[in-house]
Image (cartoon, rainbow, N blue to C red):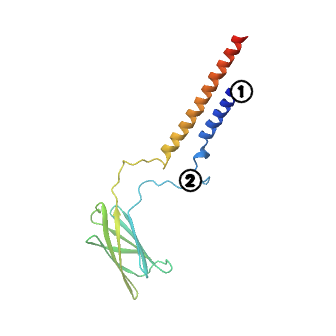
Amino acid sequence: MHLPVVLCRLGLLAGMIGLSPAVFADAGHSHDAPPAAVAGPALPRFAVASDAFELVGVLDGHQLQLWLDHAADNRPVEGARLALEIGDRPVAVTATGPGTFAGTLDAPLADGTTPVTATVRAGSADDLLAAEFDIAELHDDHDHGAPGSRLRRAAVWGAAAAGAALLVLAAIRAVRRRANGRAAA
């Protein structure tokens, strides 16, 4: 087999391998349906647990949702009273169902961390829980692409360029060989 033909086939093979999506599959690659996309940033939240209780709070603007469960079996705590303080301000919360509470903040929380203190009274159990909200300032200066997407794009273009260069080189050699064959005849 002639060298230009071999080079041409190698160039095509390199181009096909370089452009194959399987080459760029990472360790978490799956053919399953992709997970649902998050529409926006996650809402600020806190979670705290003691031997008796687990409390989770989610802040959506000024609205606060709270879930209070028994730590042992994750059952909602029925008939509990909850006193809440965020930063240095008390926040009035009302029970909305078994183990669920709602409240409204009078002002938005500042960026950074804000301490949360909750006093839980349920039956004969009393507990003091401490956590903090971490309110992160939103920045638009980060790359929204998938991790490693620039590297993958560069690798694809590099493989395509290498394949194209090999094809051009093989074509040039084939043309020269034909020209030398005609000149000799």
Specify the amino acid type for callout 2.
Pro
Give the residue number, with chain letter if any, for mark 2: 34
Give the secondary structure at mark 1: loop
Question: Badge 2: how crowded within 10 Å, few (<14), some, or many (20+)?
Answer: few
Q: In the orientation shown, which residue stands out farthest toward the left?
A: 88
Residue ID for mark 1: 2
Residue 150 position in % (x across, y down): 48, 43
* Vertical relation: 96 (above or below) 177: below
Q: CA distance from mark 1 to mark 2?
A: 47 Å
Q: What residue appears at the point 40 percent right and 61 percent down from the top-left corner?
A: 43
Residue visible at 68% across and 15% down in the picture: 180
Q: Quadrant of residue 18?
A: top right
Q: Closer to the camera, 79 or 90? A: 90
Dot 1, crowdedness within 10 Å: few (<14), some or many (≥20)?
Answer: few
Horizontal relation, residue 161 to residue 118: left or right? right
At 34% from the left edge and 76% from the top edge, which residue is drawn?
A: 118
